[in-house]
Amino acid sequence: MFSNKAMDQDNPRIFYLYPEIHDSLQYSDDFYRAIFYLSPLLRRGDTILVPSSRDDTPYGHAPATFLDGCVAELAAKVRDHVEIRPLKEANARFESFAGQHVICLWDETLRGKDPFLKRNGARLIRADHRRVQHASSIYLKASSLNGQGTPQQRRASKRRLGQLLDELRSERVLIFGTGPSLDQVDFETLPDGLHIATNSMITNRPLLAKMRPRLIVASDPIFHAGASKYAEEFRSLLVEAMRLYEASFIFPMRDIGIYENLLPEDVRSRLVGVPTKDDGKINLNLAGSFKVSSTRNVMTLFLLPLAANLAREVILVGFDGRPVEENSYFWSHSNAFQLVDHMSSIREAHPAFFNIDYDEYYRDHCTTVEAYLREMEAQGRVVASLTDSYIPPIKGRYLAPSAAAALSHRFERPQVSIVMPLGGSLAQLKEAVRSVQDQSVKDWELLCVDWNGEKGSRGWLGREAKRDGRIVCLKARGPVFGRGLEPGAGGGPRPLHLLSGRQGPAYR
């Protein structure tokens, strides 16, 4: 029986590319693909075992044309780890190996049927990119110790993210999708704020020169961290942008093995891998909890959590979605922000990835976006979209061009300002604050004027203000009754003034 321990950094490992390879196409594709994903893991004592009775070896075959051109170089570097043996001899070698056993199954039809797979406890990587939709994600998790990275990688990424959140905090953050509406955006007239670049928009060099992004975010297992020509070109443009704008790159910890293995040394200190958790919980406090909830789109996985940590005002640009009836793909993209020439090759490289129910994906995405935006606004963030969208929660926050022209003024003050004297008991204070937070209108600020508050009330209110950015604590200077502020009945606080944030004075 084989060892069934998770892959770690202590025991030697044997990676069995199973079943037997019979033809040159499997050499040029499956062998080199395995090298791409496994090479970040290999160290002294590890073996890649290839069963084949052919007279030649995979090194006599060029990699498939749709694979990243680096795979031949990677294969040459790890050649001492590769063993090629006839099937029976390879099986015996695998069984007798003293260490961890991993099977890279490139033919999914054998799973649950092949006696060799049934009789052992080896870890199984479902590596069949022809039949398994998430084969690339599974391979990537293997390349990064089950998607968790090493302790050193986690510590470094957490430290880097914390520094970025402190350094880049801003009044306003602009996050970008790559929908067709992006073609209509005048980037010269966008409001000031921190710009976060997303995915393949780094292909547009003139746009990047205007954005000068300090953060670049990408999360897709095939388009960005995958083994295709498309991903190769993306990584090349990524390195160029990181160097030019001293940008940091944020991505799932799942992909850190690939990026640290392939990207040049001078940008590795700005790689930030973030752990993902399948707990369904929205985490908007990345500084306090170093993780994001697993979602199926970069917007909810990274862009919205990052924006919520960096600013109170969040502007969406280019998140178009699609009409419900147009369900042959995820949605349309602007050609100015896509690697159009490589789209056919990525479908060749990952055919099973595109064999999904696009309606189910879209419904899930719309629901998830709604949940994130509601939570952000409940915590005091203001969210608006400068481009129209088919996604209902984004469309509901779309500012028409006439309103967008005055966007800076719109965000200077909220729609409603509420002035509340602070006095009375803690219980009364909590009741008053909760009554404001429970209103259907979310674009407000609560100005709490303290002239005689209890110590316990001040402490609770301070903590609540940190949690909900719409609450502002003010210290009264001199008499306040002459300005229309007076204690509520029984000495407790109550909101007295409802002032339009656009017309009335600010009490700051």
Image (cartoon, rainbow, N blue to C red):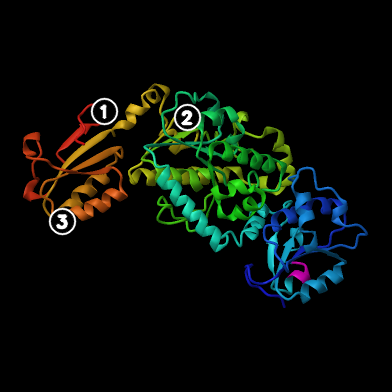
Residue pointed to by mark 2: 388
In the image, residue 30 lies at what x, y percent? 78, 54
**What residue is rendered at 55% in x and 52% in y?**
252
Q: Earlier in the sequence, mark 2 or mark 3?
A: 2
Q: Which residue extends farthest bottom? A: 1
First in sequence: mark 2 vs mark 1: 2
Question: With 494 as the anchor, is 328 left or right in this view?
Answer: right
Q: Is residue 18 visible to us here?
A: no
Give the total number of marks visible in the rendering.
Answer: 3
- Label at residue 266: none
Q: Main secondary structure of the magenta part?
A: helix
Identify the residue shown where x is 81% and y is 48%.
63
Depth check: 144 or 316 in front? 144
Question: Residue drawn at (42%, 57%), measured in percent from left and top?
Answer: 289
Question: Marks 2 and 3, how far apart in space?
Answer: 47 Å
- Dot 3 falls on a residue whose secondary structure is helix
Q: Position of residue 311 (x, y in %)?
A: 38, 41
**Amino acid found under the numbered disc labelled 2:** Asp
What residue would you read off at disc 1? 502
Quadrant in which the C terminus appears: top left
* Residue under pointer 3: 455
Segment colored magenta? 113-117
Q: CA distance from mark 2 to mark 1?
A: 24 Å
The residue positioned 6% from the left and 50% from the top of the image is 490
